[in-house]
Image (tube, helix red, strand yellow):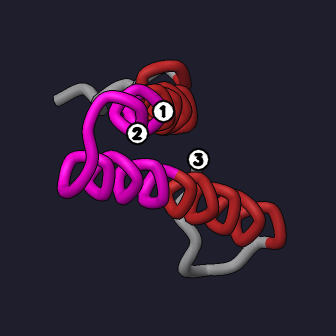
Amino acid sequence: MRPTPELPKRLTDLTPVVIVGTALWAIATVVLFFVTDGIWVQTSFSGLVLGFIGLAIIAWQRAAARRGSKSAQRL
């Protein structure tokens, strides 16, 4: 059997997905802040915060991979 080829970087990089998702949550937060109140604003703000946490995790993993940590995911 032939070995499975590696996927292209553009298909495995999560950064653009997280950035777009975070931007959409930011837009939703601003729109909902002026349109409604309550649970919907809180939900969209939570999505925004989780997007920033996701970006921090990606940066943390990349730093660990650069320094050669054994447990880091290879990007």
Q: Is residue 50 magenta?
A: yes
The residue shown at (56%, 55%) is 52
**Start and end of the magenta stretch?**
28-51
The residue shown at (50%, 35%) is 26
Mark number displayed over residue 75? 3
> What amino acid does circle 1 point to?
Val
Say whether residue 36 is left or right of residue 15: left
The alpha-carbon separation of the residues under discs 2 and 3 comes to 37 Å
Mark number displayed over residue 13? none
Q: Residues within 10 Å of mark 1 (few under 14, many from 20)?
A: few
Give whichever of 12, 30 is nearer the camera.
30
Helix, strand or loop for the magenta stretch, by majority = helix
The alpha-carbon separation of the residues under discs 3 and 1 comes to 33 Å
- The first of marks 3 and 1 along the sequence is 1
Give whichever of 19, 40 is nearer the camera.
40
The x, y position of residue 2, in whole percent, is 25, 26
Mark number displayed over residue 33? 2
- Give yes or no for contact between labels 2 and 1 (Cβ–Cβ under 8 Å): yes
Residue 16 seen: yes
The residue shown at (67%, 68%) is 60
Mark 3 falls on what kind of element? loop
Q: Which residue is mark 1?
A: 30
Give whichever of 13, 19 is nearer the camera.
19
Q: Residues within 10 Å of mark 2 (few under 14, many from 20)?
A: some
